Structures are given as C-alpha cells and as structure tokens.
Image (tube, grey):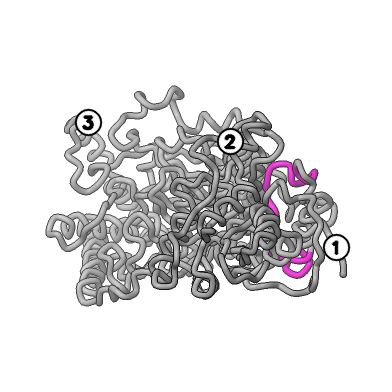
C-alpha cells in the first residue's frame, strides 16, 4: 500500500481535480512558487497562470474574487496562508460566499474551497497558530472539514473541490509531514461523515485534526488501565455527523470532546449540547470537553505545551469520567 | 457565448435607441416612486434605497453593455437591474418578500439577483461587489465578455477597493468600474470623507484609465461607458468611469435628510437626467411631447402590473425558511 505525506495528499488532490475538470482554478498568495509549505509547487508550470493565479496580499479581495469566479462557473481553490489571516476576508466569506445561494433564492452556486492552515506548532505565536473553527460552524451556508491524516487530506480535498457549496478546508501544520497509507487512492469519500478510528466500549472520544493522534496515544494508555476508548474522527465539522456520535455514545455511555481550539465557546460546546439533547438517557456522566485555556496562543515552547491539550490530559480526564 | 452585443441591428446613436433609453429611464423612475409610495403604505417593508435622479447612469451604462456581459450592483440597484431588462414583476415581488420574487423572497431590495440576465448580484456591503466582479472577470476574459460593477464615492475608501484597483490593473481584467458619485456616503458629504477631489483620481496611481462624466447627461454616460467596454473587451484592461450625479431622495426610504439643505436638492432637481435627456431628444425632433407622455404612461402602467403581480403573489411557506442554504 502506498504511503504518502499529508502535504502530498493535498497536492495530489488539487492536481487530480485540475486534470479532471478544467473549471478548477487556484488562487492565493505565493501559490505560483508553492506557498510557504510547497502544497501548490509545480501547479503553475503544469496548468498555466490563467488557472493558477498568484495574488497580492489582499485577502478580502481574494475571497471575493474566488466567490465571483465561482458564481460564474469556476471551482476555485483559494489558499489563505494562515487561518489567522482569514480575519481579513471575513466579510466576503460570511456576507457573500456563504449567503449568495440563499439570498439569490438558489440562482447562484458557490463551489469554492478555502484552504486554511492552522495549529499551534513550533512557537509561531498568537497570529500564526490559532484554531478558529468555532466561528465558522456558526455560519449557515458554509461547510467545514478537518482531515487528520494523509488519506483524508487527499480524499476530503477532492470531495470538497467537487462539492457545490463553499467548503473551509482546515489543514493542520503539525500534520503536513506526517505519512499515512492510502488504502484506495482512487476513492473520493463523502464530505460529511465521521469515522471511527479506534473502536471501544467504555468511552467515546470525539475529536478531529491533530488531536486525533493524541487521542490514539491516550487510548493505548487507557487500554492498559482497563478502559476501552472509542475514538471518533469527526472529519466534517460542519455539518456534524451526529448519527455516528450518538450511536457510539449509546454504547459507551460516556463522551469526551477534545480539540486544540480554546474550550470556551468552542465546537465542543455545540457537540456536547447536541449529545445531551439526543442521548441524555444513555449518558452515565456529563459530556466533558478538553481544549486550550482561554488565552491567545503563546510563543514560548513551555507555554505552548501548556496551551495544547495532550494524551496525558485525555487519560486523566477519561479516568475521572469513568471512575475507579 | 462571446461578446454578443445589445441592440442587434440598431444604429449606435439612432432615435430608436435613444427613445428606448428614455423609456427605460421612465420605467425606473416610475418603479421607484411607486416603491416609496408602497413603503409609506406599509405594503413594502425592509431597508430600501432608491436611486431617483441617477437613472441616466443606470441606462447609459446598461446600453453600452452586451447581452452576455455581467453586471454587479450596490445596495441601490433597482435601476441598474431594470435598465438592463430585469423583470419588474419579479423585482417588485422580491421587494415585498413574496415567493415569486426574483430571489424567492430571500434577498430583498439590497440582494437582488437575476442570473439569467447576468445581473449577478447587488449587495448590502458597501464596495462588496468589486472583488466579486474581478473574479467574474477572470471567467469573462476567457469568453470575450466584460464585467461592469457599480460602487459609490463611499466605497472608494474601503480597503478592498484599492486591493481590486491594483489587481484589475495588474492583470488587465475586462472590468468597468462605474462610480456613481452622488456626493454623499450615506449622510456624509464627500468633502468630509475623502481627501482627493474625485474618485477617478485613484486610477492614476494604479495605472488605470479613468474618466469623469456628467452622470445626469445620459448620452455622455453612454459614450464613456462604451469606450470603457470596448477597452475592456479589446484587452486594454479596466477603466474607472466616474459619473457625477445626485440622489434626489434620501439615503434610504424614510431618511429625514437632516444632513443636506433643501436648496441643494432643488438645484439638482433642475438637473434631472430624465428632463435633460427629454429636452435633448425633443430639440433633435426625436420625440414629441405626446411621445414622452405616452412613455410615462406606459411605464406607470407596467409598474402597476408589477404591483398587482406582487400583491396577488403568495408568500413563501414558513417551512421553507432554510431552503437554499446548501445545494
């Protein structure tokens, strides 16, 4: 079975979809030279500068331009170099990309992929490390996915490009050079289904992106302590695959949501509320959330370690929930 | 589709073309006067902006465009859309929030779209359609088509206006940037919000063609817009066409207009683009007083049809509130 890096999965997805469909175009800062991480390297040589458009540092207009190209029949993929910079493009994203289908009564379609790189890794500080997914799950009209591995980076990005709605594609910088097997490189998965990474009986850990691997490490530790944890990789953050979550919680009777984003007002709050609304009678304990403290992302390595949740914290929280 | 022209077989400055333009100006005027009336009677709700006094810009620009060219509006776009042949029934019903509205009642006055006529979008965000227009221009340049986008003097102070001037010029995109400079950004006069004397001045640092035109002189707008459309279609890149005009009514329906003097409004009423264009055509013998009366009557009758259509149309079902959020 072929093994590739997460970052190669992203590039292959873009290449394959650009080969397959001439309406797919790429826009963003530095995309002609591959961007800071090399995701788009080689694309302009292959597809030309009419399809791979290197833009100035003008996020709001890049977002608007991509939307304007989408409603005229293109399938743009835009790269916002760091999710922190999407703050500069919020009006076009929230007021146009997300709403044009609705406001036009279905006349307009916005098949747009917004690639966003995020994550607290390497001490890059408060403006190059944030996890902002909670903001976007609150906006009707947007979809959002966050792959945890190379196979999903490839498959979900292809699915996002083919989707007819705007999709925020959250890439974790800390996963870019992770290698995974690609079981079936030709398959394009559903954009909106969660995946059970590790089956278990005592506790459901709901997580996504890089935290999946902290949960996997935690599950191994918990297994040694006699606790069988089931790990659900959400993959899609909007919409949420509540069926998979609820079915799992009905078996394990415990749910713990883990994300790298700040706990307060985070995605975990929504997930937790919906689990208790639909599966309250099956729960043996409150739904718990683990995430970052209510602080900006610090630069110091010591503080960054204190900021990002880890396997040890997951183990401790799980043990408290299950009891002795 | 590529560069299909409007008015196939009609000579460029013929009487027949100019009469049609005047007729459309009357349609816009009648439509918006009736909209104000319906707002006062509480038959229309929402935040409604009318462009009475700016019809010369709307019709001049629309006439210069080809059928396959794309248009983007602002928050004040009933006239932009009607000038380009939008269906008055669908527009009036949209303003009322009826299910037969062009956007099924989801958009309202500020978010009208009629994609069949390439009326891509109006917007409630000042300057918000300029980036959209650039994106559509990436498509239009492959088709031989042009994109026109309206904005006001207020929008020239947004960041993305400048981002877009840079990119449109850098890539020589087929865009016509039509500034309706009506002298006010909402309630603030241009002298108090902008350091440069004219919006078109911004063309120069961005190496972009620009032109200032009397926006209440309909034929001057037509000529300037034609030049800009031809330049865009021929690969010469974008143009700012700054049309100096004035809105004879408030910023929105219900605006008490405490920020401007009645004298100023009266002075501009004397420069009413419909009256001016009518006298040009009368002096030339292209229309008689009777023709003009008939134009007004027929416009008002068409608007009454639209009002009837709107009144008789059903509301959207409450159960459909979340339809059209996703594909």
- The N terminus of chain A, quarter of image: bottom right
In which quarter of the view is residue A106 placed? bottom left
Disc 1 to disc 3, how far (Cα)? Answer: 68 Å
* Mark linked to residue B259: 3
**Which image quadrant: the C terminus of chain A?**
bottom right
Q: In which quarter of the image is residue B276?
A: top left
2 or 1: tag closer to the N-terminus: 1
Q: Can residue B87 be seen in this view?
A: yes
Badge 2 marks a residue whose secondary structure is loop
For label 2, the residue is: A297
Q: Is residue A322 left or right of residue A179?
A: left
Judge whether residue A21 is colored magenta. Answer: yes
Residue at coordinates 60% horizontally, 46% vertically from top-left? A309
Residue B317: % across, % down: 29, 76
x, y percent for residue A84: 58, 40
| Residue at the extreme front of the image, as rendered | A324
Give the x, y percent position of residue A229.
Answer: 62, 65
Neighbourhood count class around disc 2 (C-alpha, 10 Å): few under 14, some 14–19, many 20 upward = many
Q: Nearest the camera: A66 or B254?
A: A66
Query: Is B292 rendered above or below residue B127?
Result: below
Q: Are marks 1 and 3 on the same chain?
A: no
Q: What stretch is highlighted in magenta?
A: A16-35
Give the residue at x 34% y 50%.
B76
How far apart, in angstroms, are the residues tagged by discs 2 and 1? 32 Å
**x and y percent of residue A265 in the render?**
44, 48
- Residue B132 in the magenta stretch? The answer is no
Tell me the chain of label 2: A
Mark 1 closeness class: few <14, some 14–19, many ≥20 residues within 10 Å: some
Q: How many C-alpha atoms fall within 10 Å of the one at disc 3: few (<14), some, or many (≥20)?
A: few
In the structure shown, which secondary structural element does the residue marked by tag 3 occupy?
Answer: loop
């Amino acid at each position: 079975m072929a093994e590739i890096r997460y970052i190669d999965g992203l590039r292959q997805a873009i290449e394959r979809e650009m080969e397959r469909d001439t309406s797919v175009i790429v826009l963003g800062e530095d995309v002609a030279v591959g961007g800071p991480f090399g995701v788009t390297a080689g694309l302009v040589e292959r597809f030309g500068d009419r399809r791979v458009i290197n833009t100035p540092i003008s996020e709001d207009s890049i977002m608007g331009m991509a939307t304007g190209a989408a409603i005229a029949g293109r399938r743009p993929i835009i790269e916002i170099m760091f999710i922190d910079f999407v703050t500069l493009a919020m009006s076009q994203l929230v007021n146009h990309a997300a709403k044009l289908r609705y406001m036009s009564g279905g006349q307009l379609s916005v098949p747009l992929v917004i690639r966003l790189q995020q994550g607290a890794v390497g001490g890059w500080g408060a403006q190059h490390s944030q996890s902002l997914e909670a903001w976007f799950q609150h906006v009707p009209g947007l979809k959002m996915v966050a792959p945890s591995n190379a196979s999903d980076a490839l498959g979900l990005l292809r699915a996002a490009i083919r989707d007819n709605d705007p999709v925020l594609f959250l890439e974790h910088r800390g996963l870019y050079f992770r290698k995974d097997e690609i079981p079936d490189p030709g398959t394009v998965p559903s954009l909106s289904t969660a995946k059970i990474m590790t089956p278990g009986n005592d506790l459901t850990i709901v997580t996504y992106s890089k935290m999946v691997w902290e949960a996997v490490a935690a599950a191994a530790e918990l297994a040694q302590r006699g606790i069988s944890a089931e790990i659900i990789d959400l993959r899609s953050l909007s919409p949420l695959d509540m069926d998979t979550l609820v079915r799992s919680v009905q078996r394990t009777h415990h749910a713990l949501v883990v994300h790298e984003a700040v706990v307060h007002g985070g995605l975990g709050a929504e997930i937790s509320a919906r689990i208790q609304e639909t599966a309250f009678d099956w729960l043996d304990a409150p739904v718990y959330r683990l995430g970052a403290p209510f602080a900006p992302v610090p630069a110091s390595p010591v503080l960054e370690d204190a900021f990002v949740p880890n396997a040890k914290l997951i183990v401790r929280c799980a043990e408290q929930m299950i009891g002795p | 589709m590529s560069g299909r022209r409007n008015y196939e077989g009609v000579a460029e400055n013929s009487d027949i073309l100019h009469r049609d333009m005047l007729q459309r100006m009357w349609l816009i005027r009648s439509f918006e006067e009736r909209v104000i009336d319906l707002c006062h009677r509480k038959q229309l709700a929402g935040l409604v902006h009318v462009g009475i006094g700016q019809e010369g810009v709307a019709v001049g620009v629309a006439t210069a465009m080809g059928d396959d060219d794309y248009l983007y509006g602002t928050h004040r776009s009933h006239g932009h859309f009607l000038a380009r042949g939008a269906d008055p029934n669908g527009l009036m019903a949209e303003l009322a929030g009826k299910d037969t509205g062009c956007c099924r009642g989801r958009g309202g006055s500020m978010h009208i779209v009629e994609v069949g006529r390439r009326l891509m979008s109006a917007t409630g965000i000042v300057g918000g359609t300029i980036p959209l227009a650039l994106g559509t221009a990436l498509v239009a340049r492959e088709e031989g088509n042009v994109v026109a986008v309206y904005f006001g003097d207020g929008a020239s102070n947004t960041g993305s206006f400048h981002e877009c001037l840079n990119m449109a010029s850098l890539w020589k995109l087929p865009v016509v940037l039509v500034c309706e400079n009506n002298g006010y950004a909402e309630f603030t006069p241009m002298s108090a919000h902008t350091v440069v004397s004219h919006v078109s001045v911004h063309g120069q640092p961005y190496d972009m063609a620009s032109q200032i035109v009397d926006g209440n002189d309909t034929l001057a707008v037509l000529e300037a817009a034609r030049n800009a459309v031809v330049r865009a279609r021929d690969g010469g890149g974008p143009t700012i066409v700054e049309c100096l005009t004035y809105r004879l009514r408030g910023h929105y329906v219900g605006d008490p207009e405490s920020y401007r003097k009645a004298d100023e409004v009266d002075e501009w009423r004397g420069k009413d683009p419909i009256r001016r264009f009518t006298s040009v055509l009368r002096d030339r013998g292209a229309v008689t007083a009777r023709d003009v009366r008939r134009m007004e009557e027929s416009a008002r009758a068409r608007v009454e049809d639209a009002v009837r259509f709107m009144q008789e149309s059903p509301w959207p079902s409450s159960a459909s509130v979340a339809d059209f959020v996703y594909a």
